Amino acid sequence: MSVFIGVDLGWYGKPSGLASVVPEGTGLRLRNVTRLESPDAILAWIRTETGDEGGVIGVDAPTIITQQTGIRRAERELNKDFRRYHAGCHAANLGLPFAPLVLSFSRRLADAGFVHGADLTAKAEGRFQIEIHPHAASVRLFGLERIVKYKRGRRAERAAELARLRGLMLSKLPELDPPLALTLPEIPEKGPVKPVEDQIDAVLCAYIAAHWWWWGRARNTVYGSNEEGFIVVPAGNRHP
């Protein structure tokens, strides 16, 4: 059995959202979702969820960075397609302070047997890691004109937009191919929404990982390469 892990990575040592998805029947089922802080705890959770199984880990963070300055080819290509949806991504290079943290995490995944998966073929055996961009994925999977803007703004605005994303995931993901059976944490009426946001993001990351394994390049776009860095985005009903 393959296991699909979503990691909404805390780039600067902040807590990360984590989710695991497994095959069930002719589709998928959300198995676990949590939020952890230390890299050791995150890797231990991944080891527990995956065991000796194959699968794909979808990481919302750069996993390959080779150039000292500027922007990667993957980001340039993705931004060309998605900027008009407000779904562009920021530059990643070795000169930025988050680079050592994200690359260290990717190396530790590689040490656990998860190789970079830009060249994965559909339903391949093995253990793979991929970089993903949930904003771009949501545009394609949910047919959006603009991304759901839950990352910034006042608490009430962020909570309302996060509730909108949650609703889209609960209504749309069970209808996609493969379908995902899921429940999601509730948005709190008071207090911080970031813990729930991280977990909801992780579930979307896990679904993207599963979609990549399920369909490969037939229904996904790969920006960039294993050599320079890459980002996987599912195809949907609308193709930017």
Image (cartoon, helix red, strand yellow):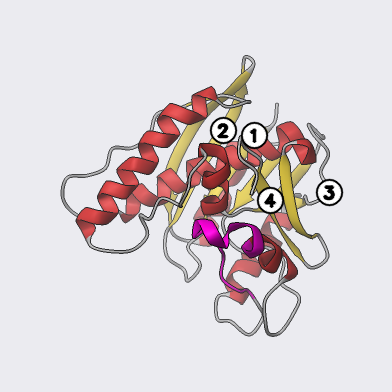
- Name which residue lies at 62% across and 48% down: 58
- Classify 4 as above or below 8: above
- SS for dot 1: strand
Q: Residue at x 70, y 26 (%)?
A: 1
In the displayed structure, 44 sits above or below 207; it is below
Q: Which residue is mark 3?
A: 119
Q: Are marks 4 and 3 in contact (CB under 8 Å)?
A: no
Q: Nearer the viewer, mark 1 or mark 4?
A: 4
Between 177 and 180, the one lying in front of the other is: 177
Residue 236: which quarter of the image?
Answer: top right
Q: Residues within 10 Å of mark 3 (few under 14, many from 20)?
A: few
Q: Is residue 110 left or right of residue 160?
A: right
Q: Residue 217: tell me if it is visible.
A: yes
- Which comes sooner in the sequence, label 1 or label 3? 1
Q: Amino acid at mark 1?
A: Val
Mark 1 touching mark 2, by CB under 8 A? yes
Q: Is residue 232 one of those drawn in magenta?
A: no
Q: What is the spatial separation of the Cα atoms under label 4 and label 3, in whole angstroms?
A: 11 Å
Q: Which residues are magenta?
A: 79-92
Q: Tell me which amino acid carries mark 3.
A: Asp
Residue denoted by label 1: 3
Mark closest to the chain's N terminus, 4 or 3: 3
Residue occupying image coordinates x 71% and y 72%? 72
Total numbered labels placed on residues in the image: 4
Q: Which mark is residue 76?
A: none
